[in-house]
Structures are given as structure tokens and as C-alpha cells.
Image (tube, grey):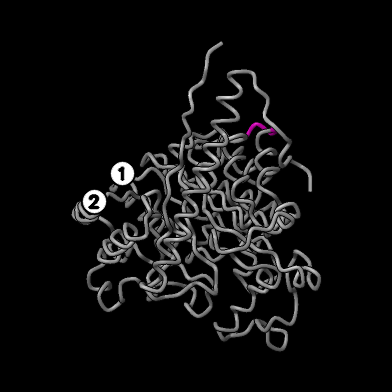
Amino acid sequence: MSIKQFEPKFMKIGVLTAALQELTPREKRDPDPDLAIEEWVVYAKELGADYIQVSAALHPTESDIPAEALLDPVANTLDLRQPFNKDRAKRVQACLDANKIGISEVGYFDNMLHEDPAIRLKKHNFMLRTMDTAALLGVEAVCGFVGRNQSLSMDQNLIDFEESFIPLLKEAKARGLVYRIEQCPMPGWTTGDNFHNNIAYTPGMWIALHRICEKHGVGDQLRIHYDPSHAILMGQDTRSLFQYLKDAGYNFLIGGFHVKGQVIDAKGVSGWGYGGQTVERGDWIKGEPSSNPADQLNAWLKQTVLCEHELPGTAKHDPLAYLQNRTVDWLDHQLAARELLALDPEKTFLIVEHEYPKARIQDKEKLKPILQGSIAFTRKIDEAAACMFALQNEVLASQGIPVQGIGRESYRS
């Protein structure tokens, strides 16, 4: 009998820089576009993170969506009004090295299938700049959405994906990159009635999209940056979702994680169900979409009427809520990832994404202990899961000793 030694394997812990939109005041960062990254690198070290996921976005002067219409503004920590070049990369890399911080991905979260051809082209060109930046910094992946063409049905969007998104994946392949897709359905992204505004929202769609990618030789470029908060929003639980992927032979698709929770509001679900509020939100005035961008925020009641985002560690431990798929069971999330997914934990990123509204403080010093606590919680919960997995699935298994109890099971509520 070969005795397996106790060797837990931990994931890489980081934070998305959109957690603090304006860490560097705009009057300082606009004339010095790489200062925002440098100051975030220093801040990440203070927070106890090992990596940052760099948030890129169209500059406020270039965006097609007014800032006041954004519920979750995306920070342009990475300023790409001018292309990122070798000199900029050298400066950023020096800061990373000095602070012993790495970059997990460069993230640009926008609609790559926008129905307006001119707007789509603008977004695609910006994504290419994002890819160029990742390649110059030696980063392995970009992270973002697929989006949805609002003028087409979901089936028609699969055709649009093949015609329009596959070229982006070919550009990623040419640069040696992976495109990791966050699966948020983006229900309040527009004032329209669609709940699913990012077609890569669930495992069935990931598989359909990946099959298209395989036909065009870019299957290795498409991976999922899984966020359990979105699974909770759609009534799913992580363990069953991972099991579904494994059963289908696609448990290799998840390549990274956003660590963000969701706490379901039972009263909101009672009133509107999981489709969210559909009428009388305030985003339509007299039967027409409001021309006031601030009113368009109310479209997010399709999501926020039934739930609220959780910053990991800030929600109460609630076993009953876990069993009802009403909040994220972080320990089982990390165990299930190791038990059911085809990934190497030591090469996998856990990126804390802060969108808990009541704690989304835009003050560096006030936010610091909140993010420090969440990042520390994320690290410790992963360490606990890694230890449990190594002890149960490796040490005990190597000696033929059964694991006690049953634990959470897939496909059960």
C-alpha cells in the first residue's frame, strides 16, 4: 500500500481593481494613465492579495453608456485611450516586481455582440487593445463577457457568435491568450425585457458555444471565469453545476473564479420570482424607455428586487440558505471545484469581486479593512477546503479509510 502524504494545494488569491473605482483621482490619472495601475498594485499589497485582475473599460469620454446608467461601474484602471506599448509594460512590470504582485487577467466586461455595428466595432477594437496589453505583460488570459445582440433571438445569437466572436478568439490565439468568460446573465443591462443579455450564462450555453469554437480551432481559447453569485441568481448551486459539466464531459471549461456571493431576498422572490420585477420599475416613462440615464438604473430591478451581492465573508453563515440555493456555501464551493473540475488548484485564480452595495465605499482607508477581511476570509476558506480535500480524497483514500458522513450532494435541494 502506497501511503499518500498530506500535501494540500492552494489557489491563487487576488482582487478585481473595480473594487475601488477611483483609487487614483482622475485629475492625476488622466494625464498619467499608468499611475492608476501602480497605485492599485501598492494597494493590493496592503490588502493582502497576491494578484490583481486589472479592470479595463472605455474611458468615460469614450463610453457609449453614461456613467449614471451603470449600476456596477467598471473601472478603467487600465487606460487604453492610447495603445499599451513596451515602455508602458516595462513601467508596470517594474511596479509589480517591486511589490511582489502578479496579474491574473486583464478584464474588459462589455457587450461584444452589440447590435449597432459601429458600437460593436469600437468594443472589439478595445478588446484587441486589451489583448495586446495582456500579451505585453505576460498575462495568460483576458476576462469578459460575450454579450447579446438585442435584435436577434437566442438561437440567432449563436450564429452571430460564430460569425463575430470567433474572430476575437482567433486574435486571442494569435497572442497566446485564453478568453475567460464571466457568466453573469446581465438582466438589467438594458431597459428591454430580456433577462439573459450575456448568452454565455449557464453550462448548457457554454457547451453549445464551445462546440462552435471547436469547429474553428479555438476551443482552447474559450474558458469560463465562474462566479457563483450568478448561479444563485438563476437558482443553481455550484456543486450540481460542476457535476453537470463533469457528466457532460466539459468539466475542463472552468478556468478561474470570481469570488462573489449573492443573498436571495425571500420577499423579492415572493413578489416577482426569479425573473425579477418586470413592470413599473421607473426605467420606462409613458410606455417608452426613459431618456434620463439615471432612470435606466431601475432596469436592474430585474435582478436587485430578488437579491443582493455579497462580498465574501460579509454574510452570515446560513446552512438552510445553502441547502435552498439562496446564498453561496463557500467551503463546499471550494471542495466541489477540487472534486469535480479538471483544474490544477495551484494554477487557478480566486479573484475577489466587490459589489456588495452597502460596503462599496469609495474611500481608500475606509474600504481597506473591509477588503482585507474579505481577502483573508477567501484565503482561509480555500486553505480549509484544500486541507479537507487532501485529507479525505488523498491521504485517507490511499489507506482505504472511508470518509465519514455524506455531505452535500449534486442535484438535491
Q: Is residue 55 above or below residue 59?
A: above
Residue at 34% in and 71% down:
23
Residue at 27% in and 72% down:
29
Is tag 2's residue or tag 1's residue first in the polypeptide sequence? 2
Which disc, if any, is residue 138?
1
As for residue 249 lying within the magenta part, the answer is yes
How far across and how far down the image is residue 140, in percent? 38, 42
Say what amino acid the circle numbered 1 marks.
Gly
Q: Residue furthest bottom?
A: 286
Say what amino acid the circle numbered 2 marks.
Gln
How far across and how far down the image is residue 236, in percent? 71, 51
Q: Which residue is mark 2?
A: 93
Residue 328 horizontal side relative to residue 14, left or right:
right
Q: Residue furthest top?
A: 1
Residue at 51% in and 63% down:
117
Q: Residues within 10 Å of mark 2 (few under 14, many from 20)?
A: some
Q: Is residue 44 above or below residue 175?
A: below
As for residue 360 lying within the magenta part, the answer is no
Q: Is residue 6 above or below residue 347?
A: above
Considering the whole magenta stretch, tell me its main secondary structure: loop
C-alpha gap between disc 2 and disc 1: 10 Å
Q: Nearer the viewer, residue 391 or 111?
A: 391
Q: Are marks 2 and 1 in contact (CB under 8 Å)?
A: yes
Q: Which residues are magenta?
A: 247-251
Which tag is nearer the camera, tag 2 or tag 1? 2
The quarter of the rendered structure image containing the N terminus is top right
Residue 349 horizontal side relative to residue 230, left or right:
left
How far across and how far down the image is residue 359, in percent? 51, 72
